[in-house]
Amino acid sequence: MATTNEQSTEPAHPIKLIVIDIDGTLLSPQRTITPRTHAAIQAARRSGIIVTLATGRRYINVAPIADELGIDIPLILCDGSIIIEHPASNVLFTQPLDASLAQQIVDVLVRHRIQPVVHHMNAGIEESWTGHEEFDTPSVRLYFKAWPENTHRRPHATLCIGQPNPLRVVAFASLEEIYKLSEEISKLNCSWNIVNTGNYGSSELAVMNPVCTKASGVQALARHFGIAMEQVMAIGDNNNDVEMLREVGWGVAMGQAEVHVKAAARAVTASNAEDGTAQAIERYALNGSARTA
């Protein structure tokens, strides 16, 4: 796939699947879905285009957004490490992290005195495993206050070792601390991404299976629907969207995205304060949905 937005001005193929990031993309700065964005998504669905979400969030805090949009197809969650059918909540696809590797990641975090948060899917139930409270920071406490369900605390030394393979390991810390962590994490056989400003007052590091990204999640879902990647449009704004924007047929970066995110896309739309997602759907998907390949 092309990695710049200068090679063409319109998709070469009709769009059959739209994959939308949530924070900074679907949601406005006020964290709402604007009427124009909602209308554009519904128009795409009425035209026969499949629309779904690809996010770093877990199912528990994506399901209400999917309900608001009326989306009733699988959702790409936890940065591509799991796809869950909505609203049935059935797991369609996972790319778990080997437990022994997850423990190595936990050990790195503990050496830096950063609380690891390990995400599991256990018999259809989302769980968060973490260490004892002494390592909790305001961001970690805010996270567990928002999502207290199915949280388990265990000693750091046995948080992952001998346990089921988790989906990912997450850390909440300052951007400086995250970059220090990434120097060690990058030496391990894993994939990882950094969100400079997350939803809990800090930067975030997510560490996953070495082949796992949002792009791998999109590829799995496209295969499920029998849709070629050339007919997929993805819209995103952050570091964890880069691979996805590169790999789909038509990647669209939000107007407020950083330069390297825009460089990964085929096109740049307006910001999330200016209905950028709606504008992208209207221009690239709705206008092109009647074209033949």
Image (cartoon, helix red, strand yellow):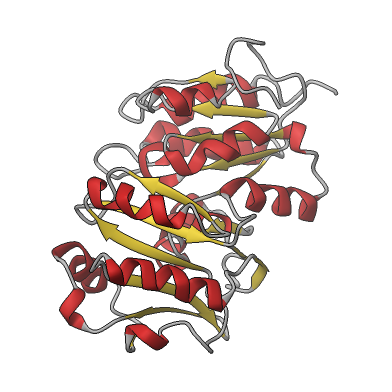
Indicate the position of residue 212 as horizontal and vertical percent values.
Answer: 61, 55
**37 versus 82 height, above or below:** above
Which of the 4 image quadrants contains residue 65?
Answer: bottom left
Whether residue 186 is visible to the viewer of this picture, yes or no, is: yes
Judge by depth and name the residue closer to the eye, 37 or 202: 202
**84 versus 175 height, above or below:** below
Left or right: residue 192 versus residue 138 is right
Left or right: residue 6 versus residue 93 is left
Total marks shown come to 0
Indicate the position of residue 15 as horizontal and vertical percent values.
Answer: 71, 31
Indicate the position of residue 42 as horizontal and vertical percent values.
Answer: 55, 40
| Quadrant into which the N terminus falls | top right
Residue drawn at (36%, 37%) of the image: 34
Residue drawn at (65%, 19%) of the image: 287
Which of the 4 image quadrants contains residue 156?
Answer: bottom left
Residue drawn at (52%, 34%) of the image: 235
| Quadrant into which the C terminus falls | top right
Indicate the position of residue 52 as horizontal and vertical percent values.
Answer: 58, 48
Left or right: residue 205 versus residue 214 is left
**74 versus 261 height, above or below:** below
Left or right: residue 230 versus residue 55 is right
Judge by depth and name the residue closer to the eye, 125 or 135: 135
Which of the 4 image quadrants contains residue 139?
Answer: bottom left
Whether residue 52 is visible to the viewer of this picture, yes or no, is: no
Judge by depth and name the residue closer to the eye, 7 or 64: 7
